[in-house]
Amino acid sequence: MKQLPNLISIFRTLLAIAIAIYVLNTPYDTQILKLAFWLTIVVIVLDGVDGIVARAQKSSSDFGAFFDIACDRIIELIYLSLFSILRWIPFWVLIVFLVRGILVDGIRGFAVKEGETAFGEKSMMKSKIGYFLTSSRFMRAAYGGIKAIAFSFMFLVQSSSFHLVDLEVVLIYVMTFFCIVRGIPVLIEGRKFFL
């Protein structure tokens, strides 16, 4: 049962892949899009559940933290790739997430070699603002919430003829802004691994 948090991460990643495949094959089927809306909420909620289970079981580990981040990144890129392929969002949004993810995760890889982690007590973030933006539970929850709303709302809007001033795209832009703002402190504080 110690692997339950990782199994939850695997399940939510596979669920996101299944959602993307079904939507890609039938992008204008309103029933599939509505189901994708609800299942996307499940995918995002399970992101919080795996951490809660890990803490409750006292099975938190450096590997578990890495695996959770990796699954988050995979899910994020699956949705953004799908939206870009279907031309629901501009291609440059996907590029921002790809570049930011590669740079930030690369730096975090160097941090792990030095005994530091992305989050928690051994966080690589030493400045208060850097820690708040990247590692605090508040910001991680806020970013996760924005992703949940942006990703699920995209399916909801696409499933109907009702568009509220392209609010779904505005939400994607807000999510992209958060992505950049949360990545900058890692890049700044990660310089120490290269000097």
Image: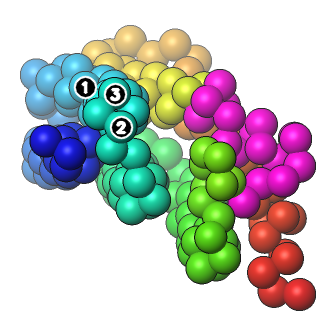
| Residue designated by label 2 | 58
Which residue is found at the position 89% from the left and 49% from the top? Answer: 127
Amino acid bearing label 3: Ala
Query: Dot 1 surroundings within 10 Å: few (below 14), some, or many (20 or more)?
Result: some
1 or 3: tag closer to the N-terminus: 1
Question: Magenta region's main secondary structure?
Answer: helix
Residue 7 in percent (x, y) is at: 17, 47
Span highlighted in magenta in the image: 124-140
In reply to whether residue 183 is colored magenta, the answer given is no
Tell me the number on the disc at residue 151. Answer: none
Residue 158 quadrant = top left
* Secondary structure found at label 3: helix
Estimate how packed mark 3 is, as few (under 14), some (14 to 19) or many (20 or more) residues with alpha carbons within 10 Å.
few
CA gap, disc 1 and disc 3: 20 Å
User: What residue is rendered at 36% in x and 37% in y?
Assistant: 58
Where residue 114 appears, as percent x and y from the top left, is: 66, 76
Q: Amino acid at mark 2?
A: Lys
Asked if residue 42 lies left or right of residue 142, the reply is left
Where does label 3 land, which residue? 56
Disc number lying in front (1 or 2): 2
Marks 1 and 2 sit apart, C-alpha to C-alpha, by 24 Å
Disc 1 target residue: 42
| Side (left or right) of 65 relative to 99 | left
Do the CB atoms of the residues marked 1 and 2 lie less than 8 Å apart? no
- Residue 80 to residue 140: above or below: below
Which quarter shows the C terminus? bottom right
Q: Secondary structure at mark 2?
A: loop
